[in-house]
Image (spheres, rainbow, N blue to C red):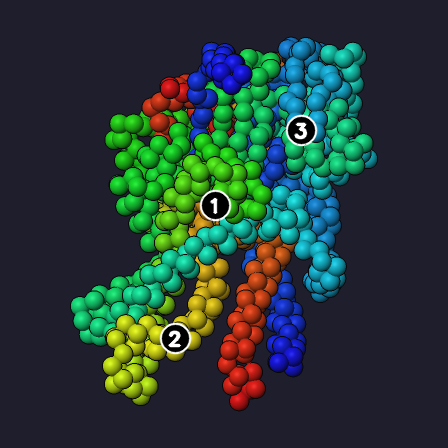
Amino acid sequence: MLRFLLTRLTLIVPTFLGVTLLTFAMIRLIPGDPILLIFGERNVEESVYNQMKADLGLDKPILVQYAYYLGDLAHGKFGTSIITRTPVLSEFLSLFPATVELSLTAITLAVLIGLPAGIIAAVRRNSVFDHTVMGASLTGYSMPIFWWGLLLILLFSVTLGWTPVSGRMAVKYFVEPVTGFVLLDAAMAGEWGAFRSALQHLILPAAALGTIPLAVIARMTRSSMLEVLNEDYIRTARAKGLPPWRVVGLHALRNALIPVITVIGLQVGALLSGAILTETIFSWPGIGKWLIESIRRRDYPVVQGGVLLAASIVMLVNLTVDVMYGLINPRIRKGR
Amino acid sequence: MKTLSGLATLGVAVALGIASPAVAKTLVYCSEGSPEGFNPAFYTAGTTFDASGRTLYNRLTEFERGTTKVIPGLAESWSVSEDGTVYTFKLRKGVKWHGSKTFTAKRDFNADDVIFTFERAWKPEHPFHKVSAGKYPYFDDMGMPKLLKSIKKTDDYTVVFELNAPEAPFIANMAMDFASIQSAEYAEAMMKAGTPEKLDLEPIGTGPFYLVSYQKDAVIRYKAHPNYWGGKAKIDDLVFSITPDASVRWAKVKAGECHVMPYPNPADLEAMRKDPSINLMSQEGLNIGYWAFNTEKKPFDDKRVRQAMNYAVNKQAIIDAVYLGAGKLAKNPIPPTIWSYNDDVKDYPYDPAKAKELLAAAGLGSGFETDIWAMPVQRPYNPNAKRMAEMIQADLDKVGVKAKIVTYEWAEYLKRARAGEQQTILLGWTGDNGDPDNFLNVLLGCDAAKTSSSRWCFKPYDDLMQQARKTSDVNKRTELYKKAQVIFKEEAPWFTVAHSIQYKPVRKEVIDFKLHPFGGHLFYGVDIKE
């Protein structure tokens, strides 16, 4: 087991370096100069421009800049935003809880709806329900989040007035951020009005972000269930005269869940990239919106640091999934 | 005992109920983005100024709400020397600073604060110059480092600015956000505490509102400054709900989640007009969208060719198709809202025959090939540069000129334009201080020609600019600028397209919200129906 863990950990190092190189190179390959963007249509004096460039370290050869960047990373320094002049790490930490809160709610919604829908669709194969679920999940999977989010806002917030349009909480509430998770903060402060408001604000963005994972989970559950339901041991269980719910709920579901759990783990990356669009539409103050804005402003340190931090989290989650999988399934651990 | 304390509580509650208004008046503004920070001297974006300079701070002079008129601010009055190089400001007394958990001001605003603010931006050796990685792009761009000779106080409430050369727009410059006055006392206290950057991160100003909290990308909360020198604001709480998407902002206004929003989608305007709960306000913006000819490149070094271009393009069609009516035909490089606008200038009519004639006279009877640069982004002065370029291209084709449309990513576009790679280019400008110099000289003077989009340096025009800078007599300046506009039209370095109109949907319960000609959003003086 230890060897397995060590191998997985060593693989992290090149991936991590690869991400630093890619983000560093890509943001610089996009044309555009952060200093000129600050000035816009305005004229900038040569001397002022050169001074700013030197202050930001952008006057050095590109490889030297990269070496400095890696050196800073080795010291745990993620750099400072060119625009806001605050450390990237502290900005990330202040915004990341919002993304986590949104993603967790989205994936919870997706599992709570997708799993039962997939199971029922498998059990009642070729029924109207099956076709509806599969049709809906195909639509959901192909839906552009951007458009879908706006559609949800138009229907539920503007026309029906059931949910707020955007933001994390109604402006009349103010909860001092402690954990950064507004639901948790509101509950800890005993502000139930704020808690309810935060929950209402979460529904639409979570639904928009959860749509694709929901579709994936429903389809995966269905096909995995169908496979398992044809196995000999299910026939045996049925032949033993077990009630149908026991056959489906215990014997089939348990075995069908293994690939589904892997898929759920893989959705973490998808959730982070989906969050970028969802957060922009719903004015959700998470890292997605933050990254988009910094790409637009060519805020090199934020793009580099932000993507690296987000990528590290995806790597960490994948590592955890791998390790857990290894724990559950000896075939993987032993590398057979 | 229980009854007694119960009665006491009731008594206190009743007393409080009478002493304070039942509900705090809250105005919610759906802003378009997060501010870059809270020290306006570091930045150039309007979004940042709305959240910092215009709410938290004051300047020596101020723009009157809704106009470009300069009125007294932290300076009650000022005088200018004969030669226009010495400005003496008499400062307002009894101006109180905001307070915070970490700082309570021991003294009122005075001359030391003015000197601190300007020397910080001006002198690289100033202890606060490099604090917060300080850069002062606006201060530099307005030519302040070269202009200032000395800033001295003669007493606690008199400050004297000595300039190296006369600069007529100086009083208007002092009303700009970059000149927002910070507290020297707060700076000193933070330096002593070893946290000088708090000066910029936890702002203390003299402005009508003070900062309560800021959650990046989510919300900014302000409260009315109770001791504001101009009297407490009519609203108690001001909230900026940060909402980058224009359609979502509009949905929030409709749902009553916010009261005012900037930058609506042109496509939503019709619905806004029809909505009974919305007052759609509009005003000509302080801007100009233009199509410039690179006068350093052939054939645009020939005045006749530039004039021919002016005759060849149907301007009204562009206003209708690109601005969807939200634009006003531009004939001068300054908008009509700025003083000295010369209404006698005759614009070139749409006349393709005349254009051909001029081209033939210039030896280009068989036409020529050129480029039209079109911005990749929407700007306040040009909602759709690509479409505009296509229309110009079609019009040019009719007079035998083959133009290809060129575009780059925005920052790259600006960089290449500054280097003068273009033959013709679409660009524009939004004014800073309402002074004609800020358009006519900043964009078209010889100082700007090295990097300007037309690279036009015409001595007779530039002489007028320099003369106008040297006098503070408004009548004399008006005359000089009017003459300059005539020369501009004749020489035709640009095809002036339009001054775009800014729209703001405001909910009906908002009272006395005024559009700011510079495009900013000011909430002092605004009230709300309960």
Name the residue nearer the viewer: B203 or B157.
B203
Q: Tell me which amino acid carries mark 3.
A: Lys
Numbered disc 3: secondary structure: loop
Q: Vertical placement of A79 versus A236: above or below?
A: above
Q: Position of residue B114 (x, y in %)?
A: 72, 21
Q: Which mark is residue A183?
A: 1
- Check disc 2 and report the residue beneath it: A254
Badge 1 amino acid: Leu
Q: Are marks 1 and 2 on the same chain?
A: yes
Q: In the image, B427: left or right of B249? A: right
Classify 10 Å Cα crowding around label 2: few (below 14), some (14-19), many (20 and above). Answer: few
Cα–Cα gap, marks 3 and 2: 57 Å
Q: Which mark lies nearer to you, 3 or 1?
A: 1
Relative depth, front residue between A150 and A217: A217
Q: Against A62, is A3 above or below?
A: below
Q: Are marks 3 and 2 in contact (CB under 8 Å)?
A: no
- Give A205 or B514, whichever is nearer the viewer: A205
- Three-letter residue code for mark 2: Arg
Dot label at residue B101 = 3
Tell me what residue is drawn at x 49 percent, y 59 percent: A272
